[in-house]
Image: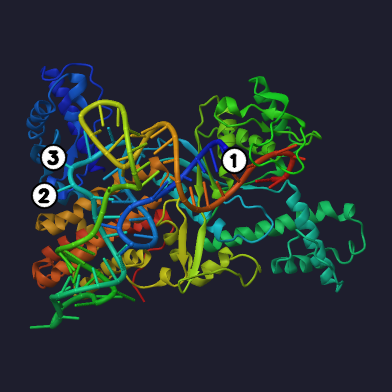
Amino acid sequence: MNLFADIRGLVIASLDAMVADGTLPEGLATGAVSVEPPRDATHGDMATNAAMVLAKPAKMNPRQIADALAAKLLLDPRVSAAEVAGPGFLNLRLEASVWQGLVNAILTTPTYGQSDLGQNQKMMVEYVSANPTGPLHVGHTRGAVFGDALASLLDYAGYDVTREYYINDGGAQVDVLARSVYLRYQEAHDVTVEWPEGSYPGDYLIAVGEALKEKVGDKYLNAPEDEWLAEIREYASEAMMDLIRSDLAQLGVVMDSFYSEKSLYGTGLIEKAISELDAKGLIYRGTLEPPKGKMPEDWEPREQTLFKSTAHGDDVDRPVQKSDGAWTYFAPDIAYHYGKVQRGFDQLIDVFGADHGGYVKRMKAAVSALSDGKVPLDVKLTQLVKLYKDGEPFKMSKRAGTFVTLRDVVDAVGKDVTRFHMLTRKNDAPLDFDFDKVTEQSKDNPVFYVQYAHARVKSVMRKAVDAGVDVSDATLAGADLGKLSHDAEIAVAKKLAEWPRLVEIAAKGHEPHRIAFYLYDLASDLHGLWNRGNDDVSLRFLQDGDNDTTQAKIALIRSVSVVIAAGLGILGVTPAEEMR
RNA sequence: GCACCCAUAGCUCAGCUGGAUAGAGCGCUGCCCUCCGAAGGCAGAGGUCGCAGGUUCGAAUCCUGCUGGGUGCACCA
């Protein structure tokens, strides 16, 4: 159920009727006709721009169209008023029974807010995809939270979503990891070692080195690198992925699949993807110009195999093979995304850190080329997280020595606070994360404020049960909602009516932060209604000795809690039953 | 030098993809608990939406050019 979609349907049907009776000419496109909440609630419940959109193509005065449309709409029993305003807006007011019916619908439809917008299209959301060389840090945390919430949102909006982690286990950084683990392995045998520049000296590898000792004893202790590198690579990256998986579990993130870069090698998929591009005339041998204004010191012209990404919107062509013939990192990335297209995904989303902004165009170019423009790729960049403690910039880590880990953050403030707070900002805006503020219990803190609203409803319901009132959903659904007649109550129902519409807007824009802001607004409405009870006893939720009215009022706030719980569910946050 | 992102109240940020008088929190001023949780609520003050043009019935939103900030710029991943 989506009231805005319902009323838009009514507007479209009325326009059709106006065409049929000759008020409007035939063949008008109604795609741009919208029905939305007016900016100012005093204008009405819903506003449509139909008259303004159609005025030009119909060669008519917008007010003339609006007047005729208003007359048609008023024939519908749901519409109580229709006024033309401003340049041609048509403001509609709906009968109270419509809003009362909405509350009933929420209580009887567990899926209220879910949408078929996605039409079950196959959607791949790739996120985190951190190199398997250590624990996840704060930056990864934001990407993980964002990607996970986006995936849940799309799922909620009717897409068939796959969450995937791409493991960059094919490159030289895994060799570095293996050598670092080897050093820890030597240390486990009481060998004193030196840590070369660029190795990974983090404490988290100590246990890996010791575990390796348990497994292989002293077999590799004095062996040359070529005897142990391959095995330790394997062993170490497995260990790191175990670590990463458990980090993600701390955040409540569960991937549908992990896709290994290494698994691409030797399968011919890279070669196949490149030859696919070659067949489209997009692969050639050539030499790139040095970047202007920033000449690398060791620049020398090299002939390489290049992908003509400029044919698909990139600024320069990109190398897929090094001058020695080995694949660049870009080649397996192309193959991986080629694989996504081959696996039948209708749409792709990649979530990258902002430092990967330079790869967006080339990845889009590759996907565009490989799918003949049929599979859209949206790349969402998550901006930096700035950490604060007591208002001061905060860095350092207990474990890793150089960076703050995901685990540090979750240990300090918890999964729910971490997730919600990281979603109260657009992904492309930098985020301040203050360890003190995010756990503060005040309305300055959206996490708390929304949780408080949910807990408040639960609290009232517990009180009601104590007073002997049946507040089961089945009973509430049968309550006499005609008793919800006060403007303040209807206003809350109106906010609830926006939920399905908001889900669609957020899903279309790939913007989960909209959910968080909506929940804050909804919580605010609930707190407001609560306090109205201070001045006006008739607005208190519990009405002594009047079960029918109490149940109607609780039906309303129970609906609020249902929507808050649904929204928090999308964000991956557990609704609070009570505040402590 | 080029590309991408950002610029909205004193501060931190929303703004429903082009709609009406641009919103919220913090801070500031003044109110509201014999009452289901005041961990809240109500009201007030506070704006040239970075600047200058353009597109049209209509622009914070789209286009162009500036200014200021962030990020990234062959054979690393």
| Amino acid at dot 3 | Asn
Residue B17 image-quadrant placement? top left
Question: What is the spatial separation of the Cα atoms under label 1 and label 2, in whole angstroms?
Answer: 53 Å
Chain letter of the residue carrying label 3? A
For this rendering, which residue is in front, A91 or B47?
B47
Residue A311 x %, y %: 58, 24
> Residue under circle 3?
A91
Residue A438 x %, y %: 42, 68
Chain letter of the residue carrying label 1? A
Report helix, strand or loop for mark 1: helix
> Residue under circle 1?
A359
Report helix, strand or loop for mark 2: helix
> Residue under circle 2?
A96
Left or right of residue A511: residue A294:
right
| Amino acid at dot 1 | Tyr
Left or right of residue A177: residue A257:
left
Neighbourhood count class around disc 2 (C-alpha, 10 Å): few under 14, some 14–19, many 20 upward: many
The answer to whether residue A56 shows anywhere in this view is yes
Picture residue at 70% right of the left edge, 33% below the top: A320
Neighbourhood count class around disc 3 (C-alpha, 10 Å): few under 14, some 14–19, many 20 upward: many
For this rendering, which residue is in front, A274 or A157?
A274
| Amino acid at dot 2 | Ala
